[in-house]
Structures are given as structure tokens and as C-alpha cells.
Amino acid sequence: MSQRERMQRLVELKRALEKDMGITVDMSRYGVEQRLLRLSRPSEDPAVQGLVASLDHPPTAAEPAEYGEAGPRIRGYYRGRPIYDD
């Protein structure tokens, strides 16, 4: 799951929790994901539980890695671009 998809799921979870529990969640604070997951525990709404289950799955590799499972090693960054070990 990409970062964009994960953030979209978090926003969907936020909206579902606000609708289910009648609360307001501030998305600008640090630790939003942990707070949303903690708030979703007592909820019995199937929509909320489905969103939590979709967030709990570990990310899967989209393409096979030719360098082993970890992929190429990044040595550092130059002007925002990664420099890989050769």
C-alpha cells in the first residue's frame, strides 16, 4: 500500500469514527495513526472495523526485487535523490 493510499484510508477512518462516535479528530497533530487506531478499538461499526483491518495488513512488494528481499541499499541522498550502492 502506498503512502497516498494509507493516508486516504486514515482519512476515511477519521470520518467514520467522527460519524460513529460523534467526536472530532485533529489530523494536524503528531501520532494521528496511533490515535485513530486506539479510538477505533471500542467501535462496533463494521465500516470502522473494515478500515482498521485494511490498515493492519503489512505492505506487499509491488515488484520483484532483483537485489534480494531488501532491495538495493541506499547509501545516501544528493539533492533529494537516493544514491545506491553499486
Image (cartoon, rainbow, N blue to C red):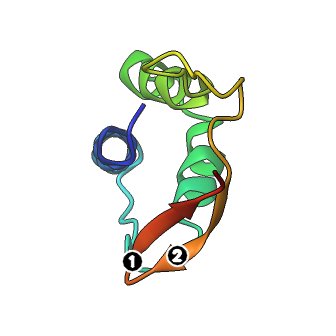
Which three-letter amino acid code belongs to the residue tagged 1?
A: Gly
* Place of residue 15 in the rendered image (x, y in percent of width and height, measured from the top left): 28, 47
Q: Is residue 13 left or right of residue 61?
A: left
Residue shown at the point (42%, 16%) measured from the top left: 46
Q: Is residue 85 left or right of residue 13?
A: right
Q: Which residue, given by chain and number where applicable, does mark 2 sit on?
A: 77
* Place of residue 84 in the rendered image (x, y in percent of width and height, measured from the top left): 58, 57
- Are dots 1 and 2 in contact, CB under 8 Å? yes
Q: Is residue 45 above or below residue 16?
A: above
* Place of residue 32 in the rendered image (x, y in percent of width and height, measured from the top left): 52, 64
Q: Which residue, given by chain and number where applicable, does mark 1 sit on?
A: 80
Q: Nearer the viewer, residue 51 or 73?
A: 73
Which three-letter amino acid code belongs to the residue tagged 2?
A: Tyr
Q: Could you say which quadrant of the image residue 2 lies in?
A: top left
**Element carrying mark 1:** loop
Q: Is residue 54 left or right of residue 41?
A: left
